[in-house]
Image: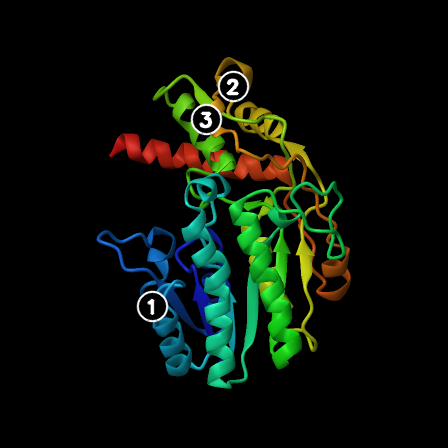
Amino acid sequence: MKRALITGITGQDGSYLAELLLEKGYEVHGLVRRASTLNRGRIDHLHQNPQLKLHYGDLTDGVSLVNLIYAIEPHEVYNLGAQSHVKVSFEMPEYTASTDASGTLRLLEAIRAAGIDCRFYQASTSEMYGRTPPPQDESTVFYPRSPYAAAKLYSHWVTVNYREAYDLYAVSGILFNHESPRRGESFVTRKITLGVAAIKHGVTDHLDLGNLDAVRDWGYAPEYVEGMWRMLQQDEPTDCVLATGEGHTVREFCEAAFAHAGLHWEDHVRYDKQYERPTEVDALIGDASKARELLGWEARTKAGELARIMVDADIEQMRRLLDS
């Protein structure tokens, strides 16, 4: 039986990846941070599965990572844990660097020191491209525009270095924005769909947003974790972009989300400067040709359908909350 370790298992991607690997018969180990309140809502439905095992640890604690790698001896490690909010990274740059950059190094070094036959996946991000114009693929020049993107770029290159220096099977998946009803509530897509649900149910009548002109390539998270897994099943390690290849503005996502609920977004959306970043990324649109040819992977759900999926889920969640 294959064993996998997932950092960030309680997050959006971690929960979908855990589902996928359990369905494939893996024994899944998840790294969770100790907190005074449990934050495991995304994996609550998996707790009865005996093949799921959770461990306390943190990417900022190298000792815990070394101990876990030695104890579990995983066949695959998926490093999805991070301080993943771009705007917050400007407010917490040192913590972001310690978790997102040095955390990857600690994990890679733990794997190297253990000397085990293990395949490593690093969750890289389209934010690393930053100011470089689209379309962006594996050969595009990086130009990070936030502490988050800079930290992730370090992780990307240190993964390449450990692959080349120590012959580790280590890859980076450069994933463009991927969303779902499990997306964190402070991320713009989920903020929009939650706002639609609240307005539809009469809880509020407005939604405050920042830059409506930013262009992003939005896909559906469950499809993207399938791509992660496929990257670790290849004969040779290589980095891949995962993306839909379509760019849409925040305004367009707003329009689709509100229209699906029978609302006009202009009647409810207000601009608030506090949501602007100090340095903005204007446009991210990925070219996933390599993943399509090498992995047989292709994004099926595009931004319009994604908005509808998320709005339906949040309207239902709001209904249950109000009825309780």
Q: In this view, which residue lies farthest toward the front? A: 94
Amino acid type for the residue under numbered disc 1: Leu
The answer to which of marks 2 and 1 sits earlier in the sequence is 1
Task: Give whichever of 238, 266 is nearer the camera.
Answer: 238
User: Horizontal and vertical percent for residue 249?
Assistant: 64, 30
Q: Is residue 285 above or below residue 293?
A: above
The answer to which of marks 1 and 3 sits earlier in the sequence is 1
Residue 232 visible? The answer is no
Task: Give whichever of 24, 230 is nearer the camera.
Answer: 230
User: Horizontal and vertical percent for residue 263?
Assistant: 51, 19
Which residue, given by chain and number where applicable, does mark 1 sit on?
54
Measure the C-alpha gap from mark 1 to mark 3.
37 Å
Which residue, given by chain and number where applicable, does mark 3 sit on?
274
Which residue corresponds to the image point at 62% horizontal and 31% vertical from the top-left?
A: 214
Q: Left or right of 47: which side holds 151?
A: right
Residue 203 placement: quadrant: top left
Secondary structure under badge 1?
Answer: strand
Secondary structure under badge 2?
Answer: loop
Amino acid type for the residue under numbered disc 3: Gln
What is the total number of numbered labels drawn onto the structure image?
3
Which residue, given by chain and number where applicable, does mark 2 sit on?
263
Whether label 3 touches label 2, CB < 8 Å: no
Quarter of the rendering occupied by the C terminus:
top left
